[in-house]
Image (spheres, grey):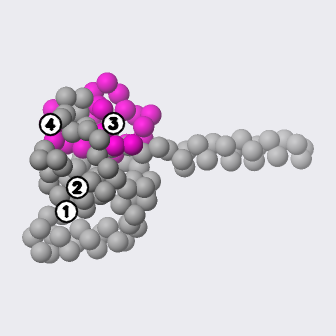
Amino acid sequence: MKTIRTLCLVACSAAFTGAASAEVVIAAGAASPLAGLSKTQVAEVFLGKAKTVGGKPTKPVDYAGSPKSEFWDSYLGKSSDQLKAHYAKLQFTGLGGPPKELGSLADAKKLAAEDPSVIIYLDKAQVDSSLKVISP
């Protein structure tokens, strides 16, 4: 009985560790001229501090079900509350707001494929032939 409990705990731990350690990447449509963005450039775009990268227009897009907390930690270094305050300040001053949010990853992929300036973040395992990774 103790052995079964131990095996269950080990299996559950492995499952949660795998789910929690999703590798978030930044992607654009396969035909996009964007490439090789640094974490700083990505943060500037998603925080509304930059509208272009290397002279190329860049539009951040979010979507329902995105790996927000992993992205915020890895790229932005801000908590949910800090981001809400940041975007509220941008909206209040008329300088912008949060990235456009779509209903699903499929919608975000479709928009990225159609518009070469759109960038999205997602789990590396979800990248397909319609996208290219532009920042690890």
Q: Tell which circle, 2 or 4, labels the residue nearer the N-terminal end.
A: 2
Tag on residue 49? 1
- Residue pointed to by mark 3: 133
The magenta span reads 109-136
Q: Nearer the viewer, mark 1 or mark 4?
A: 1
Mark 1 Cα-neighbour bin, 10 Å: few <14, some 14–19, many ≥20: some
Verify whether residue 127 appears in magenta: yes
- Residue pointed to by mark 2: 45
Q: Secondary structure at mark 1?
A: loop
Verify whether residue 118 appears in magenta: yes
Residue type at mark 2: give it: Val
Tag on residue 115? 4
Report the residue at 30% width, 69% height from top. 84
Residue type at mark 3: give it: Val
On screen, residue 63 versus residue 72, left or right, reads left
Q: CA distance from mark 1 to mark 4?
A: 20 Å
Residue type at mark 4: give it: Asp
